[in-house]
Image (spheres, coloured by chain):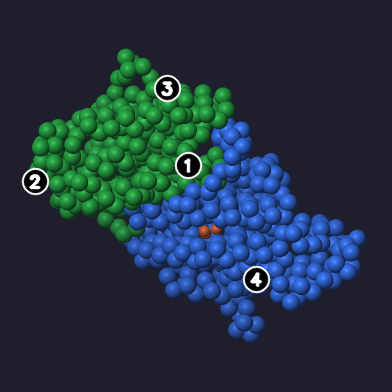
Chain colours: A green, B blue
Amino acid sequence: MNTEAIKELLYKMADDLLIIGHRNSEWTGLGPILEEDIAFSSMAQDKIGQSQALFQLLHELGEQAPDTVAFTRNANQFHNAQFLELPNGDYDFSLMRHFLYDIADQLRFEMLATSSYEPLAKVARKVKGELKYHVFHANTWITKLGTATDESHARMQAALSASWNYALGMFEEGSFEVQLKTENIFEGESALKNRWLETITPIFAKATLTIPDVKTWEPKLGGRKGYHTEHLQPLLDEMSEVFTIDPSAEW
Amino acid sequence: MYGNAYIDPNEKPKSIIDGEDPIKLAEFEARIARGEKIEPKDWMPREYRKQLIRMIEQHAHSEIIGALPEGTWITRAPGFKRKLALMAKVQDEVGHAQLLYSAAETLGKSREEMTNDLITGKSKYSNVFNYPAFTWADACIIAWLIDAGAIINQVANAKGSYGPYCRALDRICTEESFHLKYGHDNVVTLATGTPVQRKMVQEALNRWWPPIMHFFGPSDKISNHTEILMRWKVKMATNDDMRQQFLNMYVPKIWDLGLTVPDANLKKNEATGKWDYTEPDWEEFKRVINGGGPCNAERLAVRRMAEERGRWVRNALLNKAEKYVTPLA
Ligand SMILES: [Fe+2]
Ligand SMILES: [Fe+2]
Ligand SMILES: [Fe+2]
């Protein structure tokens, strides 16, 4: 078992979930309608819970406790895709990100459900079920807002265009792609990206939204290696504000 | 609920049943006296409808505004366990708003109208949320003691006469009991924690005590008006009774934790069986309820901004002429 490769995989997944969960939770009390406020909170809770489960796997591989790992690292020690740390913006961007990320996340967990690394496969099988609702929610709203009014269509199209290169950055390759694949732990980022494109393309067609021209694709890379936008550190400072008053205290 | 329905002391002192059909009114009162619930399509006096709309609407607004001071601590909650629990709690509060708005809608006022009255400052919400939650400990004190006050109020109102409101409150009370446990557990952790944590929680209690004492409202004027509302089971307990019940249940628990209540006169009067306390500053209460509190402007500005930023989404839903289906998660 290639522990370093597994740790790298677990860290980026856990960090993605923690950061998007944090961002989604910022909608609480501020959603465009109460029902959406509740839905975003519900999904945020799932994401944070899933990240905790992955940090727990890391702990079992010798890393520090989930709270310590999540609440005391700096931005350059985080491996989430930059896409997920961007501020929420308006509901259009948040929803578009939710759609693009959650489809990728669902496909990733589906692939991992048969991973040879059984602890992760076990988590993946459980998470897959939770994600059904997330993806259903995202698909419904993307289709609805893509086609409802001129304004909603224009907003969703602008959100897609603004998101796209960041979304491609989610599939930044790690240092162990080959090992993970040959050991049947994870099929790899490029396989995931292909499935993702296949899945989102027909939904965007239904939503009458256009994926940017392939010639303009320039994935925003670096997040997986600890390079982040200026938005991550303030997010982390906020997240750890209370915990770091005394990290050894029980809260 | 967060705070009892605020009855304007300047309200017209005349009888509130002027002009009602005496036969229908007698039937209506007889039903209530028998413990029956009034349902949306049943006949009801104008004033009954008006008071209930005001009360349920204020309650709903309090839930959604109440999500703001606590909500700001979701992103700062220390550790996974607290973060997840607080997210779930605040989500519940937003859910309470949703339930209550739909209960109020059965009386003929739409959610849009109510939202509009909230953000224009026409409708009230519980005064406590016009105070800031400075530290994590403030959020913990709110979750424990404000939710405790809310439960006392809601349990009383759940025995009221209007069916949809009572049923909403039954559901809400179940969730509130989890909030109370969550809040208490947080306060216990801080009160039994490091010196820094103990100091944090004592300071938070000091800050929140006056708003907590204000929470149930000033002593009710015993008027004809109040009497009728109690007979109609709109108002279920006096403000003073609820305040006494709160003190009786929670002051001993606060003292057990080694915390000090910032009122030197607070003690149980063995002769009367009631709690003596320094009379809260009701001028301050009035000032805050009329918009002069530390956070009134900010709370409404945030709500207004949320409404404005979300308008295009609501317009899109309207245009699709499809009713949004509540997610089941
Ligand atoms: Fe609640
Ligand atoms: Fe509530
Ligand atoms: Fe509550």
Say which chain tag 3 marks.
Answer: A
- Reading the chain from its start, which is encountered first: label 1 or label 3? 1
Labels 2 and 3 within one chain: yes
Task: Give the residue pinned by disc 2.
Answer: A1
Labels 1 and 4 within one chain: no
How many numbered markers are drawn?
Answer: 4
Q: Residue at coordinates 37% horizontally, 46% vertically from top-left?
A: A132
Q: Nearer the viewer, mark 3 or mark 4?
A: 3
Q: Where residue A211 appears, x then y in whole percent? A: 39, 22
Labels 1 and 3 within one chain: yes
Q: Tell me, for residue B159, which label it has, or none.
A: 4
* Quadrant observed for ligand 2 in the rendered image: bottom right
Answer yes or no: is residue B55 visible: yes
Say which chain tag 2 marks.
Answer: A
Task: Give the residue pinned by disc 3.
Answer: A210
Cβ atoms under marks 1 and 3 closer than 8 Å: no
Q: For marks 1 and 2, give the CA distance.
A: 40 Å
Q: Could you tell me which secondary element the residue under label 1 belongs to? A: loop
